[in-house]
Image (tube, rainbow, N blue to C red):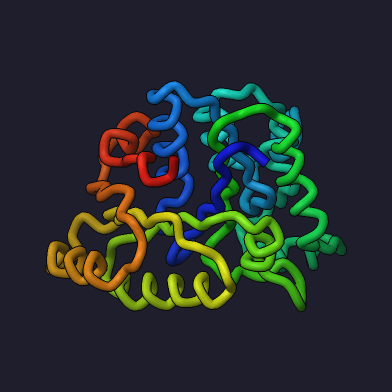
């Protein structure tokens, strides 16, 4: 694996994992680091002449400094925008932690300073009847970055996810407060509560971004605690 490798998960599907991952990659690049990223499995892909393409994986491919082929950035792709294990089941395929782990460890062949493995959805997204994406992070034995989608209910979602990660034996390297709902009530109070209860470094507080891109997100993020 890269010198510094992290697994990026979120409190739910729309927490903003990809945008925050791209922001971290951009921040690391700005500090002179070489970067790479992989989204081992993605659903909701578009059919193109080159094959299935996932918009999140394309953003990661654009944000990293290493030039990797798409199939290495997103080795398992499904067209339907449904849970990956359901998409796989409908296609008569089976995903496994060992297979996805092999793809992720393939990043180790590349020489880079900073690498991210982005999950799909939240921490307990199933891969098959007996394994989840959490098992992938456990198999890789890498620290976790938790993206908290700041909206109603985020405190409960964040604390439960953090508890699950810790119980699974992994370290939370840091968390990001990403404001996904610009109309969220008592935002500051929610943020203060999370700051008090989350036992990990806050890597950044990202406001609702009208122009949501890697450079805009990077302005509000720090990778210092990760390095």
187 sits to left or right of 156: left
Measuring from the top left, give residue 52's x and y in whole percent: 71, 40
Residue drawn at point x = 79 percent, y = 65 percent: 90
Residue 22: quarter of image: top left
Measuring from the top left, give residue 147's x and y in whole percent: 40, 57
Residue 95 sits above or below residue 21 on the image: below
Measuring from the top left, give residue 79's x and y in whole percent: 69, 50
Viewer-closest of 188 and 192: 192
Residue drawn at point x = 54 percent, y = 49 percent: 6
The answer to whether residue 47 is seen in the rendering is: no
Residue 198 sits above or below residue 34 on the image: below
39 sits to left or right of 27: right
Viewer-closest of 75 and 220: 220
Residue drawn at point x = 34 percent, y = 29 percent: 215
Q: How many marks?
A: 0
Residue drawn at point x = 71 percent, y = 51 percent: 78
Task: Look at the image and tell me in which quarter the C terminus lies.
Answer: top left
108 sits to left or right of 59: right
146 sits to left or right of 88: left
Task: Look at the image and tell me in which quarter the N terminus lies.
Answer: top right
Residue 176: quarter of image: bottom left
| Residue that extends furthest to the right in the rendered view of this protein | 92
The answer to whether residue 42 is seen in the rendering is: yes
Residue 217 sits above or below residue 184 on the image: above
């Amino acid at each position: 694996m890269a010198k510094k490798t992290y697994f990026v998960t979120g409190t739910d599907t729309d927490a903003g994992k990809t945008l925050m991952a791209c922001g971290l990659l951009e921040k690391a690049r700005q500090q002179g680091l070489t970067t790479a990223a992989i989204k081992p499995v993605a659903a909701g892909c578009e059919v193109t002449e080159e094959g299935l393409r996932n918009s999140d994986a394309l953003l990661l491919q654009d944000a990293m400094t290493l030039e990797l082929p798409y199939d290495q950035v997103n080795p398992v792709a499904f067209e339907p925008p449904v849970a990956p294990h359901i998409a796989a089941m409908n296609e008569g395929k089976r995903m496994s932690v060992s297979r996805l782990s092999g793809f992720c460890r393939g990043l180790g062949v590349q020489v880079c300073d900073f690498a991210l493995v982005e999950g799909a959805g939240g921490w307990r997204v199933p891969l098959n009847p007996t394994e989840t994406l959490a098992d992938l992070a456990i198999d890789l034995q890498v620290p976790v970055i938790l993206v908290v989608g700041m909206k109603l209910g985020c405190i409960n979602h964040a604390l439960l996810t953090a508890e699950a990660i810790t119980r699974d034996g992994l370290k939370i390297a840091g968390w990001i407060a990403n404001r996904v709902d610009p109309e969220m009530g008592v935002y500051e109070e929610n943020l203060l509560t999370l700051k008090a209860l989350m036992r990990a470094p806050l890597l950044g507080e990202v406001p609702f971004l009208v122009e949501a891109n890697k450079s805009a997100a990077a302005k509000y993020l720090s990778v210092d605690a990760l390095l």
